[in-house]
Image: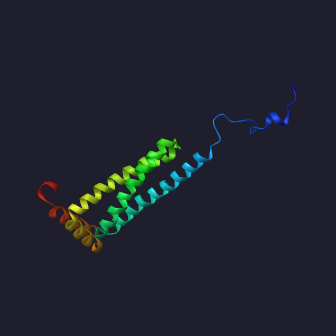
Amino acid sequence: MGGSRRLENMNPDVGPKPSQQPRSEAEKSALGKTQILFRAFLLTALGAFFVFSLNVNYVWLSAILTVAGMVLGIVVLVRTLKYKHPRLILFGTISGLVVTAVMCLLILTSVLFFNQVSQYQDCSRGALTESAKTQCLTQLENSMPGPLR
């Protein structure tokens, strides 16, 4: 056997790790606030989607939640870039902002064609078969203005 090993040499936790630097209180506080804003952003984005999917009559509430989500998302994005927070928060924020932008398009479409979408929802709620659902979709297509058919 070539040489003895000491217990201190076998412990991987001994010594400073170059990749991890201790965070100051200000950095911890900024990260905590950003995480709270990120959670609020995700809740408003998900809330807007679920309210929109309930009924087109609640499109106003979905629009309010979408605007709040967009504002919170931009705030979180700026804070993440400014304070160099983890990339997971950055990725989640960008993904959430894309979903929020799609929600904006859906809400605008629903507002522009409110009567047609409302009639389609009423029809599809009572449709029990595939042919009835297809009939509701055909009725929606026929009720749209000429260029959108």
Q: Going by the image, does 92 lie left or right of 127?
A: right
Is 127 above or below relative to 34?
below
Q: Residue furthest left?
A: 146
Q: Percent x, y for residue 99?
A: 37, 53
Residue drawn at the location 59% of the way across and 48% of the way down? 28
Q: Residue furthest top?
A: 2
Residue drawn at the location 51% of the way across and 56% of the way down? 36
Quadrant including the N terminus? top right
Q: Percent x, y for residue 65?
A: 37, 62
Q: Going by the image, does 53 lie left or right of 12?
A: left
Q: Going by the image, does 33 lie left or right of 121?
A: right
**Pick the front one: 19 or 55:** 19
Residue drawn at the location 28% of the way across and 60% of the way down? 107
Is 74 above or below relative to 51?
above
Q: What colour-coding does the image apply?
A: rainbow
Is 10 above or below relative to 33?
above
Q: Percent x, y for residue 75?
A: 43, 50
Is 8 above or below relative to 137?
above
Q: Residue furthest bottom?
A: 126
